[in-house]
């Protein structure tokens, strides 16, 4: 049973560019959440997708956008990259809203912005 | 707003001994969940244990137990019989009950287990 898979694992971009990160949830899961983890910090919630719609959003600018596909996989897009966007981007999946259950995380996509 | 505070940036423990990782939280929500995650160097966040705010008993999962003191807004993680593989970053998180999937994490504690 495959867990949460993310791609790419590492990437380097320059300021002003755009990036797309991808996530496939654990089998049987229908909800995907994205987190940003800067070096030495805890993860910060970006947004959550359920039934192909953004259900919740954290305190991130509109440069951060996402999408969920009918097969529940998801993409995170970041436009006009800034140096401060350099971080580990984690995807987490769950069935439903996981109020009492754990989220299953992928190993992340490490983005470096030069 | 919710906030998690983990005051121990780094901790050392001898193999086979127990260790307590501290976590205090601040939330105005009447119902919430508390979580602990482990993050090894691979980057993946691994779920360890969950405590609901209305649970009367402290949660336990194998070698992990959560010392929940609601009045003090404290949710410390106790790891018994530490193993070398326990060396990792540990994060405490709070989730408002009506915002499933939206975890608010602390800064983390780096645990090193000595042989």
Image (tube, coloured by chain):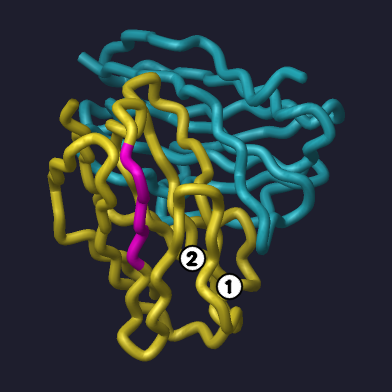
Chain yellow in the figure, letter? B
Is residue A104 among the parts visible in the rendering? yes
Label 1 sits on residue:
B52
Tag 2, which chain?
A: B
On-image quarter of the C terminus of chain B = top left
Q: Position of residue A104 (x, y in %)?
A: 61, 37
Q: Residue at x 22, y 40 (%)?
A: B111
B69 lies left or right of A22: left
Tint of chain A: cyan
Q: Are marks 1 and 2 in contact (CB under 8 Å)?
A: yes
Q: What element does badge 2 sit on? A: strand
| Location of residue B6 with respect to A10 vertically, above or below | below
Q: Which residues are magenta?
A: B76-82
Q: What element does badge 1 sit on? A: strand
Q: Residue at x 48, y 23 (%)?
A: A107
Q: Position of residue B105 (x, y in %)?
A: 37, 54
How far is mark 1 from mark 2, CA to CA?
A: 6 Å
Q: Nearer the viewer, residue A112 or B73?
A: B73
């Amino acid at each position: 049973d495959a867990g949460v898979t993310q791609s790419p694992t590492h990437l380097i971009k320059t300021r002003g560019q755009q990036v797309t990160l991808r996530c496939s949830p654990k089998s049987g899961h229908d909800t995907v959440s994205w987190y940003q983890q800067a070096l030495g910090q805890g993860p910060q919630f970006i947004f959550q997708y359920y039934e192909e719609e953004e259900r919740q959003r954290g305190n991130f600018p509109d440069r951060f956008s996402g999408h969920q596909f009918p097969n529940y996989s998801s993409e995170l897009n970041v436009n006009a990259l800034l140096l401060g966007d350099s971080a580990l981007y984690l995807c987490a999946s769950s069935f439903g809203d996981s109020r009492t259950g754990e989220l299953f995380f992928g190993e992340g996509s490490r983005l470096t912005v030069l | 707003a919710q906030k998690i505070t983990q005051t121990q940036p780094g901790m050392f423990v001898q193999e086979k001994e127990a260790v307590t990782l501290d976590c205090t939280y601040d939330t105005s929500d009447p119902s919430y969940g508390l979580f602990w995650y482990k993050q090894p160097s691979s980057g993946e966040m691994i779920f360890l244990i969950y405590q609901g705010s209305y649970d009367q008993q402290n949660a336990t999962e194998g070698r992990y137990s959560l010392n929940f003191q609601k009045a003090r807004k404290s949710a410390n993680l106790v790891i018994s019989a530490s193993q070398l593989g326990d060396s990792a970053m540990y994060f405490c998180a709070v989730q408002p009950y009506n915002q499933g999937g939206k975890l608010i994490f602390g800064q983390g504690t780096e645990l090193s287990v000595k042989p």
